[in-house]
Image: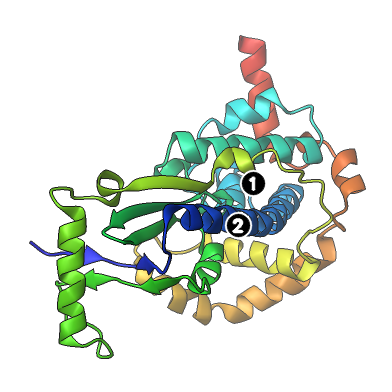
Amino acid sequence: MSTKIYDAYIFNIENLQELRNKLFKLKKELLEEVQKNYTKECGKIMASFADAPHFSDNIYHTLYDIWSLGLWNYTDAFVSKNKDKNIWTFAQMAIQEQVYRNVAYSTFDNFTPSLDFTISVTIIPYKDKFLGKFFYNNPIFSEIIKNLDYISDFSYWNNVDQPDDISDEEWDNRKNVWDDAFGDCFTFMDAGFTYNLVIHTDYSYMSVYTEVFPSISERALHIAKQKVLNNVPKSLKWHEYGQYMSEHQDEINALVAEIKKELPDITQEYLQNTKITDVIPKEVSENEEKEDNCG
């Protein structure tokens, strides 16, 4: 049976008390990073709602462009229920809803990676040492973990050759340590204990009262790329998308120049004074009114 233990570490720590203190300190550092990046992501999403008319005339395409999802379920119901809200309030509610959905429904159609700031570490005590692995989806944590001075890489696999800079003796030692540490268990969760460094409630209600919005150039480029992507031939394979976009760079540049002329300046005041019904595709409002009348 093949063994694949990637991005695993040995903690250069002497006892459980020291480990606890290190993790508490790490949690604080991670939360500071989450606050900064969560605010940034919220600013992007708020700007995307404000820019909705420039994405597509189809609400599902619009929400796809904003959330980068195949389909954001309950779109009609959510918009209908909150259509009297301004963009500022609507976007905050939508963000909190999606953070919750990330936790409740961790499937592709419901998951927004850019709003997932959860991270945990599973520790496996082994003799006088601690083995561990961090679990997260958001790449913002990679550099922080990489720079921790009390962990060392202790990955192991046997499905392909070992790294050139690790001796056979060291590689065999890692195999023996992991085999012994896991025992009859097959997963980290079964073999050790998990400490949640950041959970969704740590940031879902963080203040998103921010003036950190993407620039007009960034917004225009995002919209232009999505417009080109919306016209991708159905026969195109995923690995061909990069080449397709490169071949249409002139079209993207031309769209950016035109779109920049039409985009409003995004400020907190603008978002608070603009209703969501002023920016969502017109036919959605009409369809909702028909449904309300039929109800």
Residue occupying image coordinates x 55% and y 68%: 144
Is 133 left, or right, of 191 in this rendering?
Answer: right
The residue lying toward the viewer, choosing from 169 and 59, is 169
- Residue 201 versus residue 132 in the image, above or below: above
Is residue 186 shown left or right of residue 144? left
Q: Alpha-carbon neighbours of circle 2 within 10 Å: few (<14), some, or many (≥20)?
A: few
Q: Residues within 10 Å of mark 1 (few under 14, many from 20)?
A: some
Q: Which residue is mark 2?
A: 25
- The quadrant in which residue 263 appears is bottom right
The image's mark for residue 57 is 1
> Which of the 4 image quadrants contains residue 96?
top right
Q: Earlier in the sequence, mark 1 or mark 2?
A: 2
Q: Name the spot of residue 97 as percent of width and height, x first.
A: 60, 34
Q: Quadrant of the N terminus?
A: bottom left
Viewer-proximal residue among 161 and 56: 161
Q: Is residue 61 left or right of residue 41?
A: left
Q: Is residue 15 above or below residue 162?
A: above
Q: In percent of the image, x 21 and y 57: which residue is there?
A: 181
Which residue does the image show at 59% across and 45% down from the upper left? 63
User: Amino acid under label 2?
Assistant: Lys
Task: Report helix, strand or loop for mark 2.
Answer: helix
